Amino acid sequence: MACHPPKPRFVLALLLMLPALAASARVCVDDDAGRRVCLEQPAERIVALSPGATELLFNAGAGERLVGAVSFSDFPPAAKALPRVGSYKRLDMEAVLALKPDLVVAWISGNPETQVQRLEELGLTIYRSEPLRFADVADTLERFSVLAGTERTGRAAADHFRDGIAALRHRYADADPVPVFYEVWEEPLMTVNGEHLISEAIRVCGGVNVFADLPTLAPRIGKEAVIAKDPEAIVAGGMGEDNPEWLELWKRFPALTAVQRDNLFFVPPSTLQRPTPQMLEGTRLLCRHLETARARR
């Protein structure tokens, strides 16, 4: 059978299609710094520079593409096996570069910006992450899934999170307000202001953050300030997943309404203090605690 060379018009059409085919593999999203982040193809080697980013990437279906993470990246359990690249406060630059990532997810308020900028100068693609609202958590899942080529998983995780939070908002929309002090750290004593994601969880449950008006996201305060606010409920994250010892301190102040009514509540820190889908479960637990406080009036 004779073989005929392709017709010139067919060849020309194919050549004209090549740039479009190449562009179709390119993926782009906007990060939380408002910068456009583009990859020529979905990422295959990702390094996460915060425990929260590590968890979000797993949730978005990109766990198998993670090749490195910072210390305390412990969820899901598979994250514990990832090579470490320092801590979020002090990155091991050589370790990051040695992993040859095609995407690095940085934490805007947590990572040293000078180190992140240096990684960028060395040619690495950086996605800057800072989810500040529940909506941001869902959006981040979708963006990560686009960058990793795992859109179906990311969309499903985002929708599940959005639906769960929406259900809680509806359930507690008309709940009686409960003044709440949330203790994010004991020494120095720290809380959150009204712009913090934890404060949104408090609002979803019908609570009122008594330190909402402070100017910084995670301000240091004194015990006297808590006593002056006299919250109806005190909620602490504690040092570990099952360690509510921080609440013991407040029992020394029996005049506090929260102490008188035994409204001293613990929420595992990984479920409220990381901007990840685990916040859905943490918010559900927080809402149950505030319902208990209402019942004790």
Image (cartoon, helix red, strand yellow):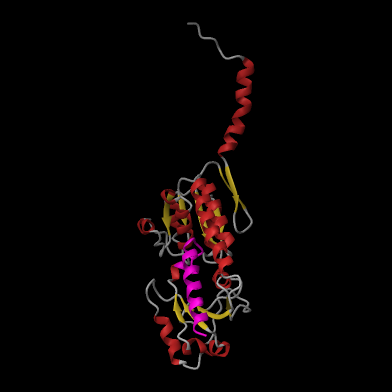
Q: x, y percentage for residue 90?
A: 46, 65
Give above or below for 42 relative to 132. Answer: above
Q: Residue at x 55, y 73 (%)?
A: 202
Residue 2 appears in the figure: yes
Residue farthest to the bottom, as pictured: 255
Residue in front for this viewpoint, 42 or 162: 162
> In x, y percent, where is residue 92?
44, 60
Of 27 and 132, the residue lying toward us:
132
Residue occupying image coordinates x 63% and y 79%: 213
Start-end of magenta stretch: 271-297
Task: Considering the whole magenta stretch, tell me its main secondary structure.
Answer: helix
**Residue 117 at least partly seen:** no
Q: Which residue: 47% across, 88% down? A: 259
Where does residue 58 sit, x and y in percent of width and height? 44, 54
- Residue 292 among those drawn in magenta: yes
Q: Position of residue 199 (x, y in %)?
A: 57, 72
Vertical comparison of 156 with 207: above or below: above
Disc tally is 0
256 drawn magenta = no
Q: Residue at 38%, 76% (x, y): give it.
A: 243
Q: Quadrant of residue 266?
A: bottom left
Task: Tell whether 7 sits left or right of 73.
Answer: right
Between residue 51 and residue 263, name the one nearer to us: 263
Give 274 or 229, whichever is nearer the viewer. Answer: 229
